[in-house]
Amino acid sequence: MGRRKGARVLVVGEATYRWTVSHRHHVARADDGMPRCGERLAVRRDAAPGRLEIVFMGGPGRMVPDGLLHSGGVATADGYLNLHRPGAVRALLDEALARGWRPTDPNHVECDGWDLFDGAVARLRAAESVATTPP
């Protein structure tokens, strides 16, 4: 069994964020009687009280690591994110900030990751397009 790693660091401008990814099995079961699986991305900014938990639960058309995908992988027919990659975390963070999450808010906020998914995938695709466009 491997060791649990600590939070990873993501620097955005002058701000430093820490993030972790974990897998969850929920008591609520799917229609087939199997436990519902999900991935959780937790993000917080250093020296700020707020914490954001972005939760991706598996379901029809929504894939999470339940035997098909690797740890941190979340996907739909229209896109894929690897929550272990800093670019994907940055895209989700930017999407959450654009939708009003504030790290200075002292509350713990949990949101449905699928609500941020399409916007984050679009941000990643735009960044990749800029990175691969010749000068």
Image (cartoon, rainbow, N blue to C red):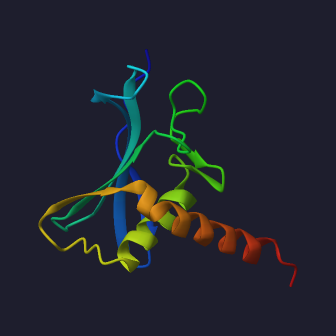
- When asked about the image quadrant of residue 95, the answer is bottom left
Residue drawn at (36%, 67%), measured in percent from left and top? 16
Kindly give the residue lying farthest to the right in the view shown: 134
- The vertical placement of 20 against 45, above or below, is above
- The vertical placement of 20 against 103, above or below, is above
Kindly give the residue lying farthest to the bottom in the view shown: 135
Q: Quadrant of the C terminus?
A: bottom right
Residue drawn at (67%, 74%), measured in percent from left and top? 126
> Quick one: 65 or 17, which is closer to the camera?
65
Residue drawn at (38%, 29%), measured in percent from left and top? 30
Q: Position of residue 7 (x, y in %)?
A: 35, 46
Q: Position of residue 22 (x, y in %)?
A: 38, 37
> Quick one: 15 or 87, which is closer to the camera?
87
Q: Position of residue 87 (x, y in %)?
A: 56, 61
User: Is 73 on the left or on the right of 115, as rendered?
Assistant: right
Q: Position of residue 50 (x, y in %)?
A: 19, 64
Residue drawn at (56%, 51%), measured in percent from left and top? 85
Q: Quadrant of the N terminus?
A: top left
User: Is 83 on the left or on the right of 124, as rendered?
Assistant: left
User: Is 58 on the left or on the right of 81, as rendered?
Assistant: left
Total of numbered circles in the picture?
0
- The vertical placement of 2 against 12, above or below, is above
Kindly give the residue lying farthest to the left in the view shown: 106
